[in-house]
Image (cartoon, rainbow, N blue to C red):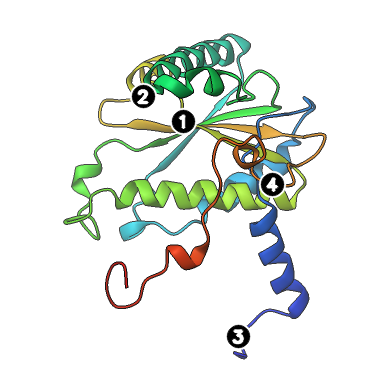
Amino acid sequence: MSDQAYSAADRAAIYRVIAERRDMRHFSGGQVAPELLARLLEAAHQAPSVGLMQPWRFIRITQAQTREAIAGLVEQERVRTAEALNERSDEFMQLKVEGIRECAELLVVGLMDRREAHVFGRRTLPEMDLASVACAIQNMWLAARSEGLGMGWVSLFDPQALGTLLGMPVGSKPLAVLCLGPVNEFYPQPMLQAQGWAQPRELENLLFEDRWGA
């Protein structure tokens, strides 16, 4: 054990919050205290980013009209997705895919504009800016779970339509609609697993040695 390791209790808490994080769709209204929301955003902002470019941008949605418009964009894409799923269309339409109207806080996370100027770590892998934003979202997700708050990542929307709605500059791109707030309970397992949509794969089937598939 490294001398730099956390205590056994601290390590257990970290692994527990990772295991119990859920993509939540059911919220119970309520509020998120300003100081708590600030802590969660700071946790997101402490994420690693390629070249320290910190490409994440957060938009807190406070107006009911804007929240409703976002819900409408998500519903439009939900219908289009169902159509694209063909034989699983009806099954998909039975799934609850968002909690936009019920959650206490609604946030949109986007990629910054003028990203082409940042080449450190992105010359051959330009998508690393997206990976950096995902790290920020994961930080917030884990912090929210530790605080007893649910969070759900909604990706069913047309990025151009949502960007226009929120006045995002050319070159930027919304990546996530985050539903955040109190929940009555956390799912004991991922919701899509519980509802039979998909089953998680074992790590041993995704882990190779020296070369792909080995």
Which three-letter amino acid code belongs to the residue tagged 2?
Pro
What is the x, y in percent for residue 211?
A: 27, 73
- Foreground tag (4 vs 2): 4
* Residue occupied by mark 2: 159
What is the x, y in percent for residue 15?
A: 67, 66
Check if mark 4's residue and mark 1's residue have beta carbons within 8 Å. no
* Residue occupied by mark 4: 189
Q: Give how far apart the Cα atoms at labels 4 and 1 are.
A: 20 Å
| Residue at x 54% of width, y 41% of height | 198
Which three-letter amino acid code belongs to the residue tagged 3?
Gln
Front residue (pair 22, 45): 22
Extreme residue toward the front, this view: 87
Q: Quadrant of residue 30?
A: top right
Residues packed near mark 2 inside 10 Å, few (<14), some (14 to 19) or many (20 plus): some
Q: Give how far apart the Cα atoms at labels 3 and 1 are.
A: 38 Å
Which type of secondary structure does the marked residue at label 1 adopt?
loop
* Residue occupied by mark 3: 4
Q: Is residue 183 above or below residue 156?
A: below
Residues packed near mark 1 inside 10 Å, few (<14), some (14 to 19) or many (20 plus): some
Q: Decide if residue 2 is in sight here.
A: yes
- Foreground tag (2 vs 3): 2
Which three-letter amino acid code belongs to the residue tagged 4?
Gln
- Foreground tag (3 vs 1): 1
Q: Give how far apart the Cα atoms at labels 4 and 3 are.
A: 32 Å
Q: Quadrant of residue 55?
A: top left
Q: Is residue 1 above or below residue 166?
A: below
